[in-house]
Image: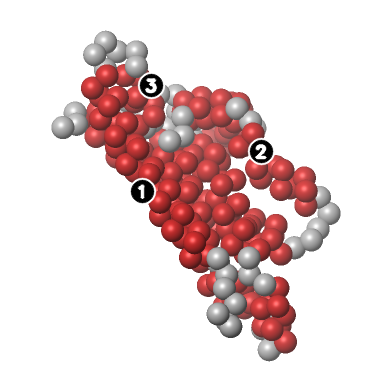
Amino acid sequence: MFNPEELASISLSLRVAALAVICGLPFAVAVAYALARWEFRGKVLFDALVHLPLLLPPVLTGYLLLVLLGRQGAIGWWLDHYLGVSFAFRWTGAVVAATVMAFPLFVRSIRLSIEAIPREIDEMALSLGARPWARFWQVILPLSLPGILSGMTLAFAKALGEFGATITFVSNIPGETQTIALAMHTLTQVPGGGAGITRLALVSVALSLGALIASEWWVRRSRFRPLSE
């Protein structure tokens, strides 16, 4: 049903989306917790910066990644020269681009879940002698788990369909950086590519729809209900 190039793009998309979720998870939880529970100077600006990839054109985000993490970039040169690590025009760079683009949705879902937990529960844990780290691991994290899972599935769906930042940062290299979205873009420029676009579109819609349904299910589970209910 699928030719080798299409199977390669599907496999790469799944790998990139899964790794984007795994890499972004600890940072998303930390940032979401800070925004939901802490008060600090510059919080509004920090919140805006976290959500900036949602507002910027994806191509601009990809260009900024290229400027920072390219082999001649401010950070990329150091990584390449001293650690031998390179992201530009490699599939690992596609993971970075997908993580950055999915991060705001990831954070927002987790933040809303944490904010739904009454602060009285924190105060009860504090009155019982729980330290801040223990309160986070034993109280906040378990109660916000549905929201975290919702954020993971939503981030997966976003990473799966990422296009603009990816093609700008890592180009469209078959077998290396060509995800489903990039493969469909290539097929639009090939005579008779409609059949391949249809096949890849069906896979993309099925995966994204499944992730969105799962995310909505976890959102419903994450709504905090008082113990009296």
Q: Quadrant of residue 48?
A: top right
Q: Secondary structure at mark 2?
A: helix
Mark closer to the chain start, 3 or 2: 2
Amino acid type at image mark 2: Leu
Q: Label 2: few (<14), some or many (≥20) within 10 Å? A: some
Residue 86 seen anywhere in this rendered image of the structure: no
Camera-side residue of 123 and 40: 123
Q: Which mark is residue 210?
A: 1
Q: Which residue is mark 2?
A: 52
Residue at horizontal 78 percent and vertical 52 percent from the top = 43
Q: With 102 as the anchor, is 156 left or right in this view?
A: left
Residue positioned most to the left: 1
Report the colour scheme.
Answer: secondary structure
Q: Residue 154, relative to residue 219: is it above or below?
A: above
Residue 144 seen anywhere in this rendered image of the structure: yes
Residue at horizontal 31 percent and vertical 19 percent from the top = 187
Give the mark count.
3
Q: Residue 100, relative to residue 29: is it above or below?
A: above
Q: With 94 as the anchor, is 1 left or right in this view?
A: left
Camera-side residue of 178 and 111: 111
Residue at horizontal 57 percent and vertical 58 percent from the top = 110
Q: Which residue is mark 3?
A: 185
